[in-house]
């Protein structure tokens, strides 16, 4: 990456995931940051999106290491054994809605709460969170996947709102929601449809990092696919 201060630190949250580990690996290989800090529920310190104290401690740990100029949030939730994307209204449950909103919307909002204020006020700083095109309300033509769609739409609103606030104190800040494309991972695997192009995590990670490098403060508050195309809210 060419547009960030080379003495600064990059943070990847959800570094245990398919896309997150690819992003962290590419950042380390490129060596354009002084160091790359990988957070996950198994890192030391651990970062669990459902535990605000762990988020605050992780943010402090990161800034103790130096100036954090890039934070990529690659966490996300779609399913676990008993919770599956809903095909119809009758499948809605508090448990599933809560699981999706906790990880996809509230967790990233708390990441912004604890990381953004700790990042340098001068020079390029960026917070990019992985959203999903299915979270677009304008682009919803198929229905279904209520909780995942709604939680990603909520995430997009958190990003837009935080971007406005952050730009008042951090004039060169960039806060965006990015769609990584359809990527092979534990999250997407059970739902791969034949005929649909599925990308490898490394390919998606490279596109995401190239896009973040191109972004300027004029792009803050936007919802983009990995090629940089604006997506409807
Ligand atoms: N794959 C796709 O086709 C696709 C398409 C559109 C959008 N996305 C988005 O891209 C992002 C990354 O997805 P992926 O495909 O790489 O999925 P993945 O391999 O399942 O990775 C998900 C990551 O989220 C972490 N996570 C889940 N719950 C957490 C919690 N409570 N606290 C902290 N971390 C938590 C997981 O950590 P653990 O290892 O601890 O579980 C893992 O690192 C997600 O936001 C997803 O919605 C993916």
Image: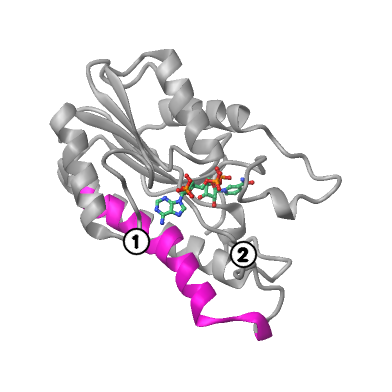
Q: Is mark 2 within 8 Å of ligand 1?
A: no
The N terminus is located in which quarter? top left
Q: Can residue 120 be seen in this view?
A: no
Q: Which quadrant of the figure has residue 88? A: bottom right
Task: Give the residue drawn at x 26%, y 51%.
Answer: 55
**How many numbered callouts?**
2
For this orientation, the residue located farthest to the right is: 195
Residue range corresponding to the magenta coloring: 90-114
Q: Does the residue labelled 1 lie within 8 Å of ligand 1?
A: yes
Task: Give the residue drawn at x 77%, y 39%.
Answer: 197
Q: Is residue 25 visible?
A: yes
Distance Cα–Cα, label 2 vs label 1: 19 Å
Chief secondary structure of the magenta span?
Answer: helix
The image position of residue 186, as x and y in percent, is 62, 47
Q: Which quadrant of the figure has residue 115? A: top left
In reply to whether residue 136 is colored magenta, the answer given is: no
Q: Which of 221 and 26 is in front in this view?
A: 26
The image position of residue 22, as x and y in percent, is 52, 29
Mark seen at residue 152:
none
- Of badges 2 and 1, nearer the viewer stands 2
Q: Residues within 10 Å of mark 2 (few under 14, many from 20)?
A: few
For this orientation, the residue located farthest to the bottom is: 90
Is 115 placed left or right of 108 in the picture? left
Q: Which of 16 and 176 is in front in this view?
A: 16
User: Which residue was labeled with disc 1?
Assistant: 50
Where is 202 relative to 78, above or below? above
The image position of residue 18, as x and y in percent, is 56, 38
The image position of residue 142, as x and y in percent, is 73, 67
Q: How crowded is mark 1: few (under 14 residues within 10 Å), some or many (20 or more)?
A: some
Where is 42 relative to 50, above or below? above
Q: Which quadrant of the figure has residue 86? A: bottom right
User: Which residue was labeled with disc 2?
Assistant: 81
């Amino acid at each position: 990456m060419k547009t960030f201060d080379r003495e600064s630190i990059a943070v990847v949250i959800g570094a245990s995931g398919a896309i997150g580990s690819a992003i962290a690996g590419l950042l380390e290989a490129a060596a354009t940051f002084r160091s790359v800090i990988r957070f996950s529920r198994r890192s030391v310190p651990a970062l669990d999106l459902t535990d605000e104290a762990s988020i605050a401690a992780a943010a402090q740990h990161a800034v103790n290491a130096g100036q954090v100029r890039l934070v990529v949030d690659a966490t996300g939730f779609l399913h676990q054994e008993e919770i599956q994307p809903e095909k119809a209204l009758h499948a809605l449950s508090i448990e599933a809605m809560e699981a999706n909103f906790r990880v996809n919307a509230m967790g990233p909002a708390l990441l912004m709460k604890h990381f953004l204020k700790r990042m340098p006020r001068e020079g390029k700083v960026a917070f990019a969170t992985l959203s999903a095109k299915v979270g677009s309300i304008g682009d919803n033509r198929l229905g279904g996947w209520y909780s995942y769609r709604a939680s990603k739409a909520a995430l997009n609103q958190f990003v837009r709102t935080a971007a406005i606030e952050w730009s008042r104190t951090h004039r060169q800040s960039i806060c965006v929601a990015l769609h990584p494309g359809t990527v092979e991972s534990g999250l997407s695997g059970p739902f791969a449809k034949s005929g649909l192009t599925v990308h490898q995590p490394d390919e998606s990670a490279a596109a995401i990092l190239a896009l973040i490098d191109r972004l300027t403060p004029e792009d803050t508050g936007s919802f983009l696919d990995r090629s940089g195309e604006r997506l409807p809210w």
